[in-house]
Image (tube, rainbow, N blue to C red):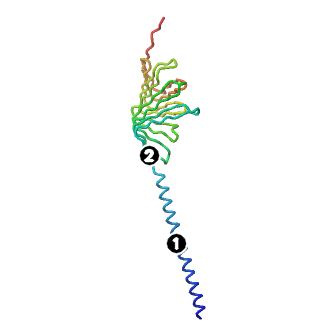
Amino acid sequence: MKARFHDRLAAALSVLLLAALAGGSYYLAEISRRMGQVTIDRTLRHEPDSFVEGLVFTRINEHGAPAFRISADHMVHFPDDGSTEYERPVLTSLDPTRPRMHLVADTGRSTAEGVETHLYGNVVLTREAGFGEPKTTVFTDYVVLYSETEIARTDRPVRIERDGSVLTGVGMEFDNATRSLTVDSQVRGTWTFAPRTQ
């Protein structure tokens, strides 16, 4: 009789222990799942993970030579999409085989890897004189710059000043490599011709 009671008691205790183990496992798995969801939600938010004051960043080309420099008063980086935002950015091309180009703006935003940089507010693009071309300055309120090709584009109104001439229009593509500038529409201008020297 006592042996049978002990067997039943042992079996009941085993069942209780298994039930407690299963319940504990379920509880821990549920906590882990909820913590995982919180972590995933946090990474999906567009929140900065770092910032820099007085930034100067130089990008090098495939040969290890300086190709492009970005400086800014303030920079913020976002890990969710790899983008970077700037206050008072200044972008300068450093390729000695092309005319030196500078861009300044109120604010800017680069995509991951810095392939595209969007500039906003009081944008001034200046190509220095050289390679047989005079200094050219472009004024607009938005430009996207493709740093690898040094092509700048906008769909906004532009004012272009070149060697005493002024051209206005809407939309522009500026290719620093080929030294070409195209204005899309509503083009108006005053062109000044330099006098011939004998």
Quadrant position of residue 122? top left
Q: How many marks?
A: 2
Residue in the picture at 47% in, 24% down: 127
Tell me where residue 8 appears, x and y as whole percent. Answer: 58, 87
Which image quadrant for residue 52? top left
- Crowding at dot 2, Cα within 10 Å, few <14 / some 14-19 / many 20+, comes out as few
Question: Measured from the top left, where is residue 22 in percent x and y?
Answer: 55, 73
Element under disc 1? helix
Q: Against 157, is 3 above or below? A: below
Among the two numbered marks 1 and 2 on one chain, the one whose residue lies closer to the N terminus: 1
Residue neighbourhood size for the residue with mark 1, other residues' Cα within 10 Å, grouped as few (<14), some (14–19), many (≥20): few
Residue type highlighted by circle 2: Ser
Q: Secondary structure at mark 2?
A: strand
Q: Name the residue at 45% across, 12% down.
A: 194
Three-letter amino acid code at the position of disc 1: Gly
Q: Position of residue 73 (x, y in %)?
A: 39, 37
Q: Residue 50: percent from the left, percent from the top? A: 44, 46
Outermost residue toward the front? 64
Q: Residue furthest bottom?
A: 1
Identify the residue under disc 2. Answer: 50
Give yes or no for contact between labels 1 and 2 (Cβ–Cβ under 8 Å).
no
Q: Which residue is mark 1?
A: 24
Instruction: Using the image, tell me which numbered label, if any, was put on residue 64.
Output: none
Task: Check the picture and name the quadrant holding the N terminus.
Answer: bottom right
Closer to the camera in the image, 151 or 69: 69
- The alpha-carbon separation of the residues under discs 1 and 2 comes to 39 Å
Question: Does residue 55 sit above or below 94 in this rendering?
Answer: below
